[in-house]
Image (tube, helix red, strand yellow):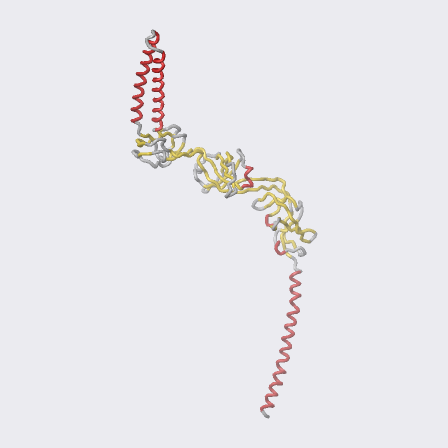
Amino acid sequence: MTLQSNYTSFAIMRKSVFAPLLFVILIGCTEKKEEKPVAVSNIRNRPVTADAFIVKRQAVSENIEVPGSLMPAEGTDIRPEISGRLVSINFTEGSTVKKGALLAKIFDEDLRAQLRKLEVQLEINEKTVERYRELLKIQGISQQEVDLSELQVNNNKADIELIKVSIAKTEIRAPYDGRIGLRNISPGAYVSPADIIATIRQVDQLKLEFTVPEKYSTRFTPGKGISFTIDGSGDRFSATVLASEYFIDANTRSLTVKGIIKSNNPALVPGAFARVNLDMEQDNNALILPTQAVIPLSRGKQVIIFRDGKPEFQEITTGIRDSSFVQVISGVKAGDTVLISGLMAIKPNSQVQLSKIQ
C-alpha cells in the first residue's frame, strides 16, 4: 500500500467519526435555543407573592422630637457699676443667696468723708435758715436772703443724696434669690464695670428652650403643654410654653420657643440636653395605612389596591404620620385591600398572590 492510499483512508475515517459528533452538537444547541423562550415565558407568568393590609379607621397622631436645652429662669453676670478696689467678697462659691444680699464691696472711704462734710454743712445751713426767719419777722433782713439760705440747704440735701447713691454703687448685691457660681476676682483687685466677679442663676425655676420647624410655628402659643426627657433619667418631664420668638430664623427656617418647666426635680440642671416631644396633631377616626404601603412619586404618592384579583395603582393624599402608620385623606376608603410588600415587582398587569393579610 502506497503513502497516498494511506492518507486517503485516514481522511475517510476522520470524516466518518466527526460528522456524527458535529450533528449531535448542532442538535443540542438547537434544543437549548428552543428552550429559552419557554423558560422566560414561565417566569413572566409566575404570580408575585405579596402581603396586604385592609384599610381601617384608627386614632393616629403626629409626633416629632426636637433637641432643646435647660436654662435657668434668670442668669446674670455680677459686675461692679463703678471702678475701684475690691475690699471684700461676702459670698461662698456655689452657695445660695437671697435677694439683696451683699456680695462684694468696693472701697468707699473717700465718698463717706464727702458725705460727713456735706452733713456738717447741712446742719450749719439749717441753723442759718432758722436765724434768718427770726430776723425776717422783725424786718432785720430781706425775704431774698432767707430764700437764698433755704436754697443752700436744699443744695446740701441734693449733694448728700448723690453721695449716698455713689456709696450704694460700691455695694454689689444679689438681684434675686439664686445660686452663685465660681468667682473670677480676688479681694484687693482693682475692678471696673467690664469685669465679671461671678455669675448668679435662679435655679429653683428652669426654662426649656428649643426650636420647631417653620410649618409648626403657629401652633406654639403661650400655655401649650409639652413634654421632654433628659439623658441619665428615665422620667418624662412636662413644661408649658412661655413665649416664642417673633420671627423665623432665615438660616434654619425654624422658630425659637421657650417654656417654663413645672417640675423641680434634682435631675434637672441648667445646661442639660433635652429631647422635646411634640404632639402636633391627632385624628381619632382617621383612615390609616402602614407607611411601607405608600410609593413616593415625583409629584405625589400612590398605593397599590388589590381589587377583583388584580392590582390597581391609585394616587392618594396623606396627612398625619407617626412611626408606623400614615393618615390617608383621599384615594382609598375603609375596607380596601392595599398591598404592602413586593411593590417594586408588581406591574399593572401582574398576577398577585396574597400570602398574608393584616
Q: Nearer the viewer, residue 173 or 335?
A: 173
Seen at 68% across and 53% down, the residue is: 310
User: Residue 316: percent from the left, percent from the top?
Assistant: 64, 47
Q: Measured along the vertical axis of the image, is residue 267 above or below residue 136?
A: below
Q: Measured along the vertical axis of the image, is residue 278 above or below residue 90?
A: below
Residue sitting farthest toward the bottom: 1
Residue 357 in view:
no
Residue sitting farthest toward the top: 138
User: Residue 78: percent from the left, percent from the top?
Assistant: 38, 33
User: Residue 222: percent from the left, percent from the top?
Assistant: 53, 33
The quadrant holding residue 138 is top left
Seen at 65% across and 71% down, the residue is: 31
User: On the rendered structure, is 323 left or right of 171?
Assistant: right
User: Residue 193: percent from the left, percent from the top?
Assistant: 36, 33
The quadrant holding residue 322 is top right
Q: Nearer the viewer, residue 126 or 3?
A: 126
How many dots with numbers?
0
Q: Measured along the vertical axis of the image, is residue 166 above or below residue 337?
A: above
Seen at 30% across and 18% down, the residue is: 121
Task: Name the image quarter holding the N terminus.
Answer: bottom right
Q: Measured along the vertical axis of the image, is residue 358 above or below residue 21?
A: above
Residue sitting farthest toward the right: 308
Residue 190 in view:
yes
